[in-house]
Structures are given as C-alpha cells and as structure tokens.
Image (cartoon, rainbow, N blue to C red):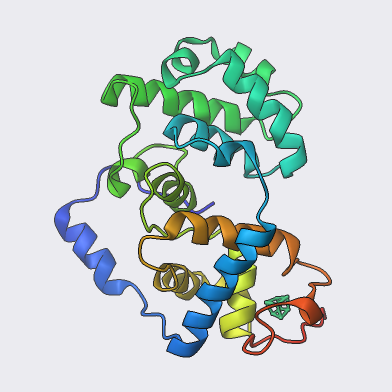
Amino acid sequence: MPRRNHTLATRSQRSKRKSRRPIASVDPGAKRRFQHRLLKWYLEHGRDLPWRRTSDPYKILVSEVMLQQTQVDRVIPKYHEFLERYPTFRDLAEAPVEEVRETWYPLGYNIRPLRLHSIARETVARYGGVLPKNPDELLSFKGIGRYTAGAIRSFAFNEDAPILDTNVMRVLHRVFIGAGDPKTQKAVLWALAEALIPRGKGYDFNQALMDFGAIVCTARDPYCLLCPMKDFCKSYPFESG
Ligand code: SF4
C-alpha cells in the first residue's frame, strides 16, 4: 500500500499532482475491445460476493481492509461476523480496541483492525459517522491509501475512480505493456486504470478487472488459450520465467 499524506492537500498541491500525472497512451481499438470484452466476461463469470450486494461505504471499507492480505473465501465468514457485531462506524468506534482485535482473529496482519477502528473513530469525530466522498478527504485518513479510496469511491459512491491492486496491476501490465517489471511502472498503470474506465461504468469495470485477474489472468499459468483478450494482449501467450 502506498504511503499517503495525512493532511488535506491544498489546491496548488492538487494541481501540481495533476500536472505530474503520466498520460496513458492506449490504442483506441484495443481500449474499446478490452472494455467491451471485459464487461461481457464479467456478466457471465463475475463472482457473487456479499460486499457486492451493498453500497454502504462502511461495509465496503470493512471488506476492502479484510481483502488486503486475505483470500476471499477466508474473508466472507469474518465479514459477516464483524458486521453483525459492529454494524456501523459508530458501533465500531465505540468498541474497545482490544475487543475489535479479538473479533478480527484469525485473519492476521493485526494492524488492520487497529486502522479500521481508528478510521471509524475519525469518521464519527470529523464527519458524524458518514464517510466523505471527496478523494482528498478520503486520503487524509490514516489507513486509507489510493487503492482503498478508489474502491470506496467506485463501489460505494458509484464514481468512475480507478483502482490498482495486485490483480489489476498484473492484468493491465500484461495486456497493454507486456515488458518490464509492473512494480516499477505504477504511475503509468494508475493512468491506464483511469483511462480505461468506460464512462459511468466504473463500478462494474473495476469489479470485473479484479475478477478477471483472480480467475483468468492469474499470477501463475493464466488461461491464455481461452482468454477473450488474446488477439491484442501484449503478453500472449504468457510464459512465466
Ligand atoms: S492472453 Fe494471457 S496474459 Fe493476456 S490477458 Fe489473457 S490470460 Fe492474461
């Protein structure tokens, strides 16, 4: 997770940030095909996950924090248990931190429940228990980085905000770049993640990207022969070194 600035950015800081952003150059034909085929694939193969049945920013945040280091099948039961015990930011904020840590067990990476608890307290103290939409305000929370802010904006507030987790980074790098180490190309990949979103479809597009990376374009042995992107993917056929 990238480290973030915990104070609100000023207007000039924001405009400097924008001017430094790389421009993603994508072949328009490949972009259209990728968008169309990804959304079609998602319609047929997308996973039915509990956090896709809600737009509550609190529940989306809980799921995103749990998913940061843990597989989906381990997260699902804990997600339900956690929300039953702490259904709102206020419930979580009022709970003793030690109890929250115990409820989190056995998910591991125990900094995560502490961060979640601190976000809940801040949300109650600064925003009356309602998470803000504004990206700079979201990024001002300790524990909310660029990925999580994008996920909240896109999955809770239905905005066309980009996300870039490990799965998304792998898919975009393989399809549109095909060379070098994706970890050293994050700025370009973020720009790609933003440029590729079809207008008004950020929610489905981002969910589809994550599923596609988890199911088809997997880290090892991706299903290239059956892949709908194979005729323009820059890594086809992918061979792990
Ligand atoms: S062709 Fe292979 S490497 Fe390219 S997107 Fe499909 S699964 Fe991934």
Q: Residue at x 39, y 47 (%)?
A: 153
Is residue 129 placed above or below 164 in the rendered structure?
A: above
Image quarter for residue 130? top left
Residue 141: x %, y % from top left: 38, 37
In the image, 129 versus 198, the foreground residue is 198
> Is residue 6 something one can see in this rendering?
no
Q: Residue at x 50, y 35 (%)?
A: 54
Image position of 94 (left or right of 165): left
Instruction: Give the position of the C terminus as an image quadrant.
Output: bottom right
In the image, 39 versus 150, the foreground residue is 39
Is residue 64 placed above or below 205 in the rendered structure?
A: above
Image position of 25 (left or right of 222): left
In the image, 138 versus 180, the foreground residue is 138
Residue 48: x %, y % from top left: 66, 45
> Is residue 173 something one can see in this rendering?
yes
Residue 87: x %, y % from top left: 51, 18
Q: Residue at x 73, y 77 (%)?
A: 227
Exactly how many numbered labels are in the figure? Answer: 0
Is residue 6 placed above or below 10 in the rendered structure?
A: above
Image position of 170 (left or right of 52): right
Q: Residue at x 22, y 66 (%)?
A: 16
Is residue 161 placed above or below 193 in the rendered structure?
A: above
* Ligand 1 image position (quadrant): bottom right
Image quarter for residue 121? top left
